[in-house]
Image (cartoon, grey):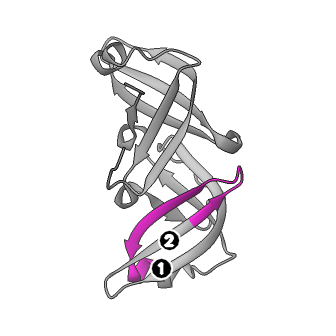
Amino acid sequence: MKISARNVFTGKISAIQNGPVSTEVEVTVAGGDKIIAVVTHTSATTLSLAVGKDVTALVKASSVLVMTDGAGIRLSARNCLAGTVSKVTKGAVNTEVAIKLAGGGEIHAIITHGSEVELGLKEGVPATAVFKAPSVILGVPA
């Protein structure tokens, strides 16, 4: 599969919570990191989602926020993946930030250059990638 999403995670479904409209799906990826997705009940049925099934989770880099100090903050975003900045690629307007996750994976975010400067992002800085569960697209093998 070729796709423009910068963040492609393969893993297994580790939990499902069905609802009448939406279904919450927990995906455990390599290294043990967990990604939460919310899909429609119809999509969950069409994809035959079930615990133990192999799945690919896609997240656009533009949907990922970067947080450097979350002390005392509670967020409604279900996905808060902690790690360390592994690469910063500066552009005139935007900056791409790569965060190496505790489990060994990597996630990319596209943020404004101003935010990169304000957060003091550079290699080695602890950072957390934050994104909402509805921003996750799930795919299954055909």
Q: Quadrant of the C terminus?
A: top left
Nearer to us of marks 1 and 2 is 2
Left or right, 32 with respect to 44, comes to: right
Q: Position of residue 6 (x, y in %)?
A: 41, 58
What is the CA distance from the residue labelled 1 to the residue labelled 2? 8 Å
Query: Which mark sits nearer the N-terminus, 1 or 2?
Result: 2
Question: Which numbered marker is on residue 55?
Answer: none
Q: Position of residue 89 (x, y in %)?
A: 47, 80
- Helix or strand or loop: what does disc 1 sit on? helix
Q: Position of residue 46 (x, y in %)?
A: 31, 15
- Helix or strand or loop: what does disc 2 sit on? strand
Residue at point 44% right, 17% down?
49
Residue at point 32% right, 56% down?
4
Q: Quadrant of the N terminus?
A: top left
Look at label 1 and name its amino acid. Glu
Cβ–Cβ under 8 Å for marks 1 and 2: yes
Question: Which numbered marker is on residue 116?
Answer: 1
Question: Would you identify the image quadrant in which residue 61 lies?
Answer: bottom left
Q: Nearer the viewer, residue 119 or 64?
A: 64
Q: Position of residue 76 (x, y in %)?
A: 47, 43
Q: Decide if residue 74 is in sight here.
A: no
Q: Nearer the viewer, residue 73 or 90?
A: 90
> Is residue 111 highlighted in magenta?
yes
Q: Which residues are magenta?
A: 99-116
> Is residue 137 highlighted in magenta?
no
Question: Which numbered marker is on residue 97?
Answer: 2
Residue at point 40% right, 48% down?
59
Look at label 2 and name its amino acid. Val
Check the image and name the residue furthest to the bottom: 92
| Residue 125 versus residue 26 in the image, above or below | below
Q: Decide if residue 33 is in sight here.
A: yes
